[in-house]
Image (spheres, rainbow, N blue to C red):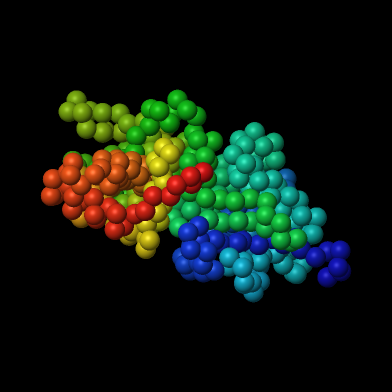
Amino acid sequence: MPNNQLPPSFSFHFEDDEQGEHTVPAVVLVQILDNAQHAFELIGVHVEGREIRSRARIAAATSKRFQLVCQLPQPGSYAMPVTIGGIGELFSADLANRAFGIFRGVMESVSARSSAGMASVLPNERIRRGVLEAVKGMAPRAGARWKLNLHDDHDASFATFDVQTIPFVDETLVPVAQREAARVVTGELKSIDFAERRVTIIYPPTSKELACFYEEAVEDLLYERRRDLIQITGRVLLDDQGAPKQIIDVTDIRDLDLSLLDIHTIQHDRLTLKAVPALSLEPTLDDTKQLLCIEHVGLALDVFAPTREALLAELNEQIAMLWTEYALTEDDMLDSVARQLKQALLAVFSEVRDAA
């Protein structure tokens, strides 16, 4: 291959916000690479001048033409270099560079929280939505200890994804009025009818089937999320007894995430607390399987919420309240039980002054 036909390249840099460790869990690495690959395939369809039809899969030739080829990892916040395209006959330097230009522009816009920038770089709404869903798969979920930086071939950072990235993408994908009317329902996946755009789940509180109707724009999510318990966000219609009977205007479908929450930092208003070592908390489901819960007797924590993101927000608020009410109160103002809680809080957390 001539020198002027070298494939474009960039690198993923994984950083631990708290510890600065140069490691990354294998499952996180695989997830990010898989979603980045999907983003390039979608952008590849766009630069080839084609459209994605309903339920049509991306052609094998497109997948190969825009495949990410991993290079040897490099030291420094665990850097994983990749190139776009290969050396086979399907490779086109022009298409690969155009695809990388769009990818970079979208990632920069996401990092800058610019919805207008994303639409300008990638006007095709269906493809843009698919790429943004891939971004959600590349970004850390609520409670994650890592963040992702994307660097170009000159090692200059052009995008950073942290725990605020997914909420921004969700706000971009779903209009405000639709978000305000939406509700999250957790259920056991029973069937998917692509022809009618209907997902059927078993709603645990009633053990009845619940039909969920989605728009074409979220159909791609169904190919990836087929585990037993899933969370569906949409407008819920109720029966005469006040129980859900149908979900319409579905905007999000995701697997239920009950993985450990490793709490390093608590932030609420102007209060910042550090936990050293990290406080590991395991979410569970309540009896209805509609609420994620966290309980910690020693710290008097009893938190519940319908989603992982909301659970973390509630956890931050409750710990901040306990810190203010107990840890910052003089001992002679507390009874024996309250003093024990104060000492437990002080043993886990320390306040960071002037964190901003």
Picture quarter with the N terminus: bottom right
At horizontal 26% and vertical 33% (from top left) the residue drawn is 245
Camera sees residue 218: no
At horizontal 31% and vertical 33% (from top left) the residue drawn is 246
Quarter of the image where one finds residue 125: top right
**Is 256 left or right of 340, judged from the image as shown?**
right
**Is 98 left or right of 233, judged from the image as shown?**
right
**Is 108 left or right of 343, judged from the image as shown?**
right
Reply above or below: 196 against 18: above
Quarter of the image where one finds residue 199: top left
Q: Position of residue 321 (x, y in %)?
A: 29, 40
Q: Position of residue 173 (x, y in %)?
A: 52, 36
Q: Position of residue 223 (x, y in %)?
A: 46, 52
Camera sees residue 129: yes
Q: Position of residue 69 (x, y in %)?
A: 66, 67
At horizontal 60% and vertical 61% (from top left) the residue drawn is 13
Looking at the image, the residue that sits furthest to the left is 336
Closest to the observer, 37 or 157: 157
How many numbered marks are there? 0
**Is 14 left or right of 290, judged from the image as shown?**
right
At horizontal 40% and vertical 54% (from top left) the residue drawn is 274
Closest to the observer, 353 or 191: 353
Closest to the observer, 349 or 218: 349
